[in-house]
Structure formats: structure tokens, C-alpha cells
Image: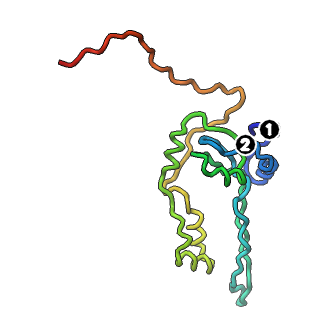
Amino acid sequence: IPGSNTPVEVVGGKSADKLLPELAKRRLSHTRAGLVSLVVKSGVPPPPPKERLVSLNGKFVTVSDPPPPGPNGTAFTITVDAGAAEILDRTNVIVGTVLEGQEVVEMLAALPTVKDNSSSPFFMVAKNIGDKRATVAEQAFGKPFKKVTVASCGIVTADTPPPPSPTPPPVVADAPPPPSPT
């Protein structure tokens, strides 16, 4: 973690809890494009348990749905501008930066996403009666329509050399003008 001496191996699950102290310190802020951060905690409190009436062995019984799982340290974000700093600083820990390929990140950010339709009366009714399709639809809000797969990535360490920068063409002083087409 940049600016920290705390070694953390994030592999998901309870190991995300090790990042909570780093989140509390807030050494870095999401103030520019290209910052990579891990989601450490949810930005909203968990919803109250939803109770439903079900038939069990011929009797009606009230059951509660378990709350959705919290973040497990496997989801990450890459900033494309500084607009979301306030939200991301509360929920994410910055772990790195994009060294090359920010234009690919911006292309991904420009993909069309599923519209938040939670204000629809049909969605609200489905959600209130416990229709699982509404929950599945809600999980898709804001996600791209197309599947995005990261095919090649790596870990940057202190001894990893930076990628070679492309060499610019040589500048020739006092070069003769190109021939005119006649």
C-alpha cells in the first residue's frame, strides 16, 4: 500500500478486514485519473433483514433473508477523473496507479451500462414482494452491457523496471523542405 509499511496480502474474504485500518488513515485521496483502489467496505449500510411469509410443512412461517455479503477485497476501481473522490475515499484503499493503458480504462468507462431503474413502479413492487428477479436486476445497475475480461495484467514491485517509453523520431535541424507536387 503506497505510503504504508503494513504488508497486506489481499486474497478476498476476511483478509479485506486487514485493510480497514489503512482506510481509516486515508493517506491518499482519489484526486486524479488512473488510481487503482480496492473496495474495502460498502458505501451504504446493509439493508434491514427482509421478512417473508412462507409455507413450511403445511404451516405458515416468517423467515428472514440473510443480508447480502459485504466487500471481500477482490473488487477494485480505477479512477477516470477526480469527481468520485468523496465517495471512493470513504470506501476504497488506493493500492497503485495505471502505468500505461489509461486510454483503455477510459474506453471501458465509456461503455453503455444498465440504467438504474429503481424508480419504476414495477421494480418497486417486485422488490417489495421479494421477487428475486428484482434483486438480480438491481445488481446489474451501472454495469456494462458487454462482458469485460482482463486478459493480461501483472504486479508492479519496487524492482520492476518501468516500461520502455517509445522513442520519438529524431529532430533534424535545417532539413530541406519536401518537394512540391507539380
SS for tag 1? loop
Q: From this view, report whether residue 168 is shown above or below residue 6.
A: above
Number of marks in picture:
2
Q: Position of residue 116 (x, y in %)?
A: 54, 65
Quarter of the rendering containing residue 2: top right
Q: Amino acid at mark 2?
A: Leu
Q: At 60% from the left edge and 34% from the top edge, which residue is drawn?
A: 99
Tell me if 101 is positioned left or right of 39 in this view: left
Vertical relation: 101 (above or below) 115: above
Residue 72 seen by the camera:
no
In the rendered image, residue 175, in percent from the top left (x then y), is placed at 36, 10
Q: Position of residue 157 (x, y in %)?
A: 70, 31
Q: What label does residue 28 carry, if any? A: 2
Q: Residue at x 70, y 59 (%)?
A: 43
Q: Nearer the viewer, mark 2 or mark 1?
A: 2
Q: In the drawing, what numbered circle is on residue 79?
A: none
Q: Residues within 10 Å of mark 1 (few under 14, many from 20)?
A: few
2 and 1 marks in contact (CB < 8 Å): no
Residue under numbered circle 1: 4
Element type where label 2 sits in the image? loop
**Residue 11, horizontal then vertical, whole percent:** 73, 47
Q: Mark 2 Cα within 10 Å, few/some/many (few <14, many 20+)?
A: some
